[in-house]
Amino acid sequence: MKKFFNKPVDLKKLKANVLRNLEEQSSYWGNYAKKLHNFTEEVKNCPICNSDQSAAVVTIYNFNYLQCESCTHVYNSSRLNSKMRKSFYREIDKPISYSDTYTDKKVQKYRLEHVAQGKVDFIQKHINKTPSKWLDLACGNGDIIYLAEKLGHNITGVESNEDCINYAKEFYGLKIDKSKIENYNPKEKFDIISLLGITDLIPDPNALLKKCYNLLQPNGIIAVEFPNYNSLSTLIQKSFPNQIVCRHMYPTVMNIYTYKSVELLLKNIGLNIDSIWWYGMDIYELTTNLMLIEPKTKISGLSDSLFLYMNNLQEALDKNEQSDNFLIIAKKQ
Ligand SMILES: [Zn+2]
């Protein structure tokens, strides 16, 4: 297995709209978390291995996260049930009223060029033919599709969020298939399937990966991103459980993975891990939590200093596999 580390990015630029309103952001997401309980149902078994043996590891806004004693996977013991998910997400997807269109557009451009581009370049390294047939599930606003098309691939995007679909149409001229992943059943098969930023928000990782397996051509590859439980961000959230500025373990998050639980998940389905890329925003998370809890962090220059060396500090975590994310390329056996 090939290993890759670090994804340098200017988080002051990428997070400009969050950093302008840090206090409001935190209280917004905090209030939302409190409302969430009415929409949830209890989860009793590990979503990866089905064991009912677990230990509580952290409580965030009264949501208990459990760690499976068998496979080490971590999961939220209360999750949005399928009936209420739609109405909840309709609420949560409403834009926050203090957003600034000019800043948002600049941030979006920066995200395309410095976040999405890096992921597409990484996936491209593992593709051996152009054009390839590529499926991007939960494709968001179409960044990945836009960039993969530029490389010459035939790419299909699937998304359920109306705002994202409209954005992709307006800014990139893309036509996205509107569907929930679980209802999407194309007849064709694909050379590549990407699942970026979604494995935390789905109730049944086995069903999703199995579906991808069935949609892949023989020797097809999957590019899938996972939030990492064994990360500094987890320790930060354990330290500041009721001060949310990043959504590493926000209560809508159903699953937080460990390398061990991912290995089990993919192996059982018949997917062989080829490469892994460790990267994250842990130092950013630490910095914003310090800024929120103690205003002197800004006055003293501590936060500026942490931002200045953020990529270097993050790299140390990435190299020790303690980043809050990892992206895996796996091949169908
Ligand atoms: Zn388990």
Image: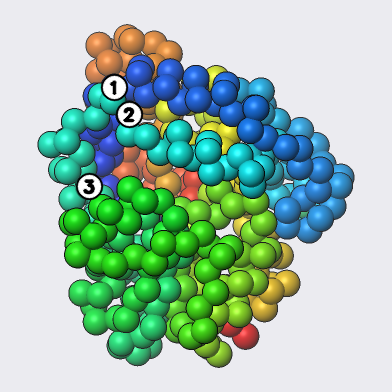
Q: Which circle marks residue 108 in the picture?
A: 3
Q: What amino acid type should be assigned to the residue bearing mark 2?
A: Ile
Q: Residues within 10 Å of mark 2 (few under 14, many from 20)?
A: few
260 or 135, which lies in front? 135
Residue mark closest to the camera, 3 vs 2:
2
138 or 179, which lies in front? 179
Alpha carbons under labels 3 and 2: distance apart: 16 Å
Residue 211: x, y in percent?
A: 61, 72
| Mark 2 or mark 1: whose residue is earlier in sequence | 1
Q: Which circle marks residue 96 in the picture?
A: 2
Q: What amino acid type should be assigned to the residue bearing mark 3?
A: Gln
Q: What amino acid type should be assigned to the residue bearing mark 1?
A: Asn
Q: Is residue 307 visible?
A: no
Residue 180: x, y in percent?
A: 51, 59
Label 2 close to label 1 by CB (< 8 Å): yes
Q: Residues within 10 Å of mark 3 (few under 14, many from 20)?
A: some
Could you tell me which residue is drawn at 32 percent across and 34 percent down? 95
Q: Is residue 122 visible?
A: yes
Residue 121 position by quadrant: bottom left
* Quadrant location of the N terminus in the rendered image: bottom right
Above or below, 4 against 56 in this view is below
Q: Which circle marks residue 21 in the picture?
A: 1
**Secondary structure beneath label 3:** helix
